[in-house]
Each structure stands twice: as structure tokens, then as C-alpha cells.
Amino acid sequence: MLDVAAVVADVRRGMIPAHVYNDPEIFALERDRLFSRAWVFLAHESEIPEPGDYVVRRVLADSFIVARDEDGTVRAMFNMCLHRGMQVCRAEMGNASHFRCPYHAWTYRNDGRLVGLPFHVDAYGGEDGFAKEGQSLLPAPALDVHQGLIFISLDPDAPPLRDHLGDFAFYLDLYARQSPAGLELRGPQRWRIKANWKIGAENFAGDSYHTPHTHASVVDIGLFREPKANKRKEGALYTAGPGAGTTYKLPPGDLTTRLRHVGYPDEMITRMRGAWTRAQRGLVENDGFMISAATLFPNLSLVHNWPKIDDSGTVVPFISLRQWQPVSANETEVLSWFAVDAAAPEPFKRDSYKAYVMCFGSSGMFEQDDVENWVSITDVAAGTMARRLNLNSRMGLTSAGKPLKPPLAGFSGPGTAYQGFGEFNQRHWLSMWGDHLLRPPPVHTSADMGAAR
Amino acid sequence: MTGTTETNTANVNVPLRYTDPDHQDAHQFLVEEAATLDRQDFAGWLRLLAEDIRYVMPVRVTTARGAGFDSLADMGHFDEDMYALRKRVERFGTQHAWTEDPPSRTRRLVTNVRTFRTGHGELRVESYLLLFRSRGDTRDHDLLSAGRADILRPAPDGHRLARREITVDESVLRTQNLALFL
Ligand code: FES
Ligand SMILES: [Fe+2]
């Protein structure tokens, strides 16, 4: 029998009971207490630019139609017919003014409203038997958008998204707002890995320590210069609000020089200069740090790297968003998008896409080795011995639990930052995870469909 | 969100007869290529490719019948030129490509080969591929099912693969990564 309080207490000491990476009881708690409450990323507005555009996305087993209605409003609707529960949309993307249920032909507009109910009078006696007026597919209990990123929460009492994002918005916007145009997303590539969803989320939050070794091959072949151990440990790790991330230290120079170093053309640099706040510019210009990987709790990660995309050594940066969609305790669906500033010139978009496909995603040369590790961890976390092993996640702390060195003074970004290797960020992520596991599930009410009012 | 036209529509032209030497050359090329990849002779595989190769594998998506597309025009699992393919091969040659060390056991079953002459002396070759992949001793095997449309260009010593478009049959791949070639 799982003692969740003991597990969380161990986690708070930086000792991670290994079985949490493959344990159906833990997974059930994550479903009922974490994903029933947290703000979860579903889609980006650029994926559904036109009225009627939709994508279908899930939060664990719950399927949602994310659609832009005829007025341009973005909605997320539970993809379950109000009548007998059929999925009213079985495509994953498209454009539709209406969704007609295949079972008995109830019909919903793309804003979710029930507009067609065959034989309403014959079968139900009209409104008295089934009150059709005002019925619609169940909306996501909470929906909010930040920089085009559409999030939902299954908790109707979720705090406003912007409050939840807090200080992490500073870093998120460095990826998501390189110009007022914001990002456009392509994809996602989707594939399933036999790995627990937490491992990727923690890794992207702060595991700069794995980069020199796990990704040694991409340095060997000259694809990406930066992961060498000495360079990697000069980077800063930050925690801020519900997020955490890693950075690389750039060579000396002003904002323009440093953004050129990672491959941005001057016209994009001009827009970044205008779109970023003084403090955001300061992170690059004064502190010399460039964002790399990050995770927004619970399961949205971002990455920004700048590999060489041709034999003449042209360096081009790319951004990827990825979601670790839990399937079970030992399986995760990865959704990996290529993202680029919508205002970027076409040649940059083309080259940045090439950089992405080489490095990340289903065939990416970084991602290949990451996933091999995560599958292996999950495989061996299932057994009896894993229940006797508390993994050490205390990097960067003394035995007394104090940081080995003080936080970076004068760091331009909000939150707390440390230079060098450490597992501050993973502990930060796991601490939020523990908070959720100890809270009872949110209260909810059930909606009766069409019953007498 | 943009899509290409539906990719699962077979070429309606009449292929070369199986007795045609061009068809036989094309079929043999594909079988030898599969053997080269299954024995992990990646350098040998690169020698089968034209310098200007385009090697693409669009993301397949589930769309309504009549939507007019079932793959993404602007996102692939692969979208490679010779530089990118060489880098991938070079990586497998390092001591640090953990994902394939120990290597997968693979078997590429190549069938349903249809060959068409194009106007430029090149051959267009369509084939079915079923790739069996086994890793370690505790995991289930993976299967990748795909159609391929290739352009083979004549060379003094045989043919070179100048273009390959891989139409994978899953929208969500059930393999941990594409640390392999299809
Ligand atoms: S289940 Fe949808 S109309 Fe009956
Ligand atoms: Fe990694």
C-alpha cells in the first residue's frame, strides 16, 4: 500500500524513491490530484488560425476539441456527445462549421452549441423531455491563453493562468515573443515511448549535467559546439514560478553580437530588442546567458539550441515545444512542435526547421539518446529493488541542505539562479509534484444533460 | 496547419512488367539497400545516395475523409539533405551514440515493388516496407509500416537514390525514436 506522505517527504529531502518512475498507484494519484487541477498546455493559436479550424488534443484520457468558432473565439470542448457519449470528432485536425455525432446525428456548432437533435418532438416531446436550448458540449472547466499558448485546467476554480505562470512568464516570453507577431507552430510529431512522463519533464527543467555525456556524440560530429562539459557548467540554472530552465553562457559581446552568435539575422534581432523588456535583454546583454531547455510544470517543455546546419558551418537557432503526455505509469506520448517567430524571414524559417529536425523530435540526434535513457530508467523502476532505492537528487547541496554556492547575484531574471551544475530545478519541479500529490482532488459537480429544469 | 494531398492513393499509371530489366534493377537495388541497412553498413548506404538527395517522411495525421490531406506539408519526421544524412551516419560511428549501442536488431521486408519510367531517364519506384525492430531483452518489438516512393537515377555502376518520400502508416509512431533509416 502506497504511503504517499512518506514518498513526498523523501522527495523533499532530495531523495527520490525510484519506483515513482513506474508505479501504477503513483500514476493514479497524478491523474486524480495533479492533472485534475493543473494548467495543462493543449495547443497554440497558430495551429487553428481560421474560423472553423480545430485540433483534437488530450489531457490523459480526456479528449478535447480545440476549435476557433465563427467569431474567432477559441474554445476547448470535451469530445463526448451529450446523448450516449460518442466522440463527436474523430479526426485530429481539420476545419468544420459543425460536428455531427456519428451515432444518432446530434449536431453541434463549432462553438459547442447543440443545434440539431433528430425527432426532438417525436422522441422527447420537445423541450419538455429534453431541454435542448442552451445545451452545449461540456466546455473545459477553465481555459486561458498566454502568448497564443492555449492552456486548460480541469479545475473550475483554477487561478487565472497569468497568476499561475508568475515569474516564469519572463522566461516563457523569451521563447514565445521574439516579436509582437509571436510564435507559429508546426507539427506536432507524435510518438510513444516506454518511459514515465516525469523523466522528460525533469530533464528539460534543469539537467545540464547530462548534456556533456548523453549528447557527447553531437559534439563529436561538430553539430553543436556548446554541450562540452566546461561550457555547460558555465550556464545558469533558474527556477521561477511554476517553471525552471537551463541556459548557456555566451562569449563576450553586446546584445546584437550575442544574438548573432547563436545565428539570428539582424532583422530578427531588431524585433527582439523591441519586444523584450530591459530585464529580458539584460539576461543576454549583461549576464551573457542564452535560454536553452525549460519546463513549465507539469508537462510542457521548451528547447532553444543553435546547431550547424551545413558543411560551411552556418549556425541557426531553433525553438521546440514539447509535451510529455502521460499514457500510463510506463508510457508517454511525446508531442513535439517546431516553433518559430511568425515574423521571421522565410529563409530563416526554412533553416531553423532543418536545425530542429536534425536535433529534436522523433528522429532528432539529441532526442534519440535522451529517450533511450528514459526508457531504460522506467524499465528497471518497476521492480522490488527499486522500492528499496532512494535516488540522490541533491546535487548542489551540502549535507546540511545548504547550496554549495550562493545564488547568482545581480541575475537579470526573476526567481533564483545558480551557475554550474545542480539539481535545484528538478527538486523545484518535484516539490510542486509533491504538493499536488498531497492535496485532495478538486471538488466538482456533475452536469445533467437536458433533464427537467 | 497545411496538408498535402492524400498520400495513400496509389499511382494509377501502369507499372513496368516484372520481366522488364529496369524493374528488375530497381527491385534488386531496394533489396540490396535493405540488406545494407540491416547489417548496419551505414557508410555503404550513403554510397547508394545521390549527392543532391531529398529524404523526407511527412507526419501523417488523422483527418476526415474529404479533408483533402492526411499528412503535414510542413512537418516531417525526416526532412533531410546529404549533410543531415551524413551527420546522422557520422554520429552512429562515434563511441557515444547510446541509443543504438547495443544496436537494435532490424529486418526490413521490402515488397510490392512497382517501377515506372519517368521522362528523364530516371525510375520512379514504389515499395512497401515493414521494419521489424527488436531492442534488448525486456521490451516488445516495434513495427514500422510505410510506403516509399523513390527516384532512382542511373549511374555508371548502378543507380543512386535521388529522392525518397516515406509515407508512414501511423500518426503516432510506436517506436522510441527514428535512430534508423527507412
Ligand atoms: S451518442 Fe451522439 S447522438 Fe447519440
Ligand atoms: Fe538531453
Image (tube, rainbow, N blue to C red):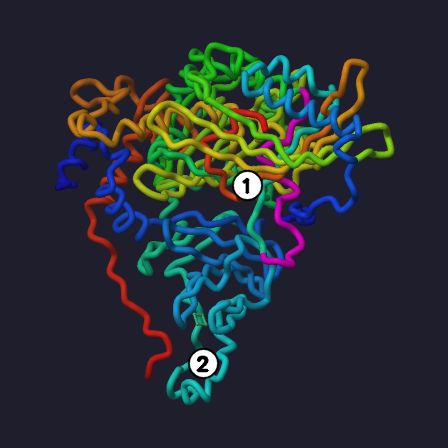
Q: Where residue A83 sits: x, y (%)?
A: 40, 72
Q: Where residue A342 sits: x, y (%)?
A: 63, 42
Badge 1 element: loop
Between A185 and A399, the residue placed more toward the observer is A185
Q: In which quarter of the image is the C terminus of chain A?
A: bottom left
Residue pointed to by mark 2: A133
Between A331 and B131, the residue placed more toward the observer is B131
User: What residue is rendered at 56% in x and 64% in y?
Assistant: A69
Drawn side of residue A65 relative to residue A436, left or right: right
Tell me, yes or no, whether the highlighted magenta stretch contains residue A215. no
Q: Quadrant of residue A241?
A: top left
Rendered view: B127 above or below A58: above
Q: In which quarter of the image is residue A432?
A: top left
Badge 2 element: loop
Q: How far apart are marks 1 and 2 (CA)?
A: 41 Å
Label 2: how many residues lie within 10 Å, few (<14), some (14-19) or many (20+)? few
Would residue A210 be visible to someone looking at this image? yes
Residue pointed to by mark 1: A177
Q: In which quarter of the image is residue B158?
A: top right
Q: Where residue A117 sits: x, y (%)?
A: 48, 79
Identify residue type, mark 2: Glu
Output the chain of dot 1.
A
User: What residue is rendered at 34% in x and 32% in y?
Assistant: A199
Task: Tell me which segment is drawn in magenta.
Answer: B64-82
